Amino acid sequence: MTIGFIGLGNMAKAMIGGILAKGLMGPNEIIGTAATETTRTKVANKYGIQTRSSNEAVAKDADIIILAVKPQYLKVVIADIMDTVDDSKIIVSIAAGKTINWLAKEFEKPVKIIRVMPNTPALVLEGCSAVCRNDLVTDNDFHFVMELLESFGKAYTVPESMMDVVVGISGSSPAYVFLFIEAMADAAVAGGMPRKQAYEFAAQSVLGSAKMVLETGKHPGELKDMVCSPSGTTIEAVHVLEKEGFRGTVMDAVQACIEKSRNI
């Protein structure tokens, strides 16, 4: 079994790193290509994988072809590889906004397609991926791809109709969290804390809080109430956030992201 990556950007590198770290495949079973020789060389040197100089060469040699390019480049990539793709190969797309039906039409023939929406925490093996497939993908095919995705985080099966929502809540949300961490750190710096330490305190607090939600199974509101003592400092801060429309702003941001994904 050989996996081929068309595109060797951050997400592709995160996936390759996770697959190798978990020992699911060896470097000799992974091939990839990128637009520049510089990128191909850097990735080959870092991970020990093979590279090819063209999209077509990767598609020809790979059993699973991962389309790790931006949505606007998919048409060109599919045109490059469509003649070398048959119904024995599995196409995995990580491009936002491009549906399984759209991909199938571009290939102009029956093709096994799995659509994935990962996110950048995959770079530290804490990704969250949503996954769906077309009817040509067998259970065994799907199970194997899910194993690959779980090598760098969590992977969940969702209806394709939920993919744009996934973009808003997971695919793009690390940016919101980074912004929140930066804002908290800025406030701590204003209070006199060194910036490096401020980032560490803010980031570790977000990490620990997220872990509490996942591991305790408690409602986030209940966990919030546990921190808010009567007449305390935390409830005072929560009051300001509520007054300034914190929840509504976050909801509006996620909904704007979902709508943008739907219209790509």
Image (spheres, rainbow, N blue to C red):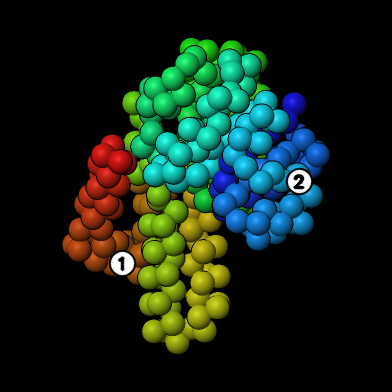
Residue in view at x 25 percent, y 58 percent: 246
User: Where residue 237 is drawn, which disc sits there?
Assistant: 1
Picture residue at 49% right of the left edge, 14% below the top: 110
**How many residues crowd mark 2 within 10 Å: few (<14), some (14–19), many (20+)?**
some
Q: In front here: 27 or 131?
A: 27
The x, y position of residue 139, in whole percent, is 60, 14
Q: Residues within 10 Å of mark 1 (few under 14, many from 20)?
A: few
The image quarter in which residue 259 lies: top left
Nearest to N terminus: mark 2 or mark 1:
2
List x then y, in percent, for residue 24. 75, 34
| Type of the residue with mark 1 | Ala
Residue at screen point 39% across, 22% down: 105
Work out which quarter of the rendered image holds the N terminus and state it: top right
Q: CA distance from mark 2 to mark 1?
A: 50 Å
Q: Secondary structure at mark 2?
A: loop
Considering the numbered disc 1 on the image, is that residue within a helix, a strand or a loop? helix
Q: Which residue is denoted by mark 2 in the rendering? A: 49
| Callout 2 amino acid | Ile
Q: Residue at x 71, y 46 (%)?
A: 51
Task: State whether residue 218 appears in this view.
Answer: no
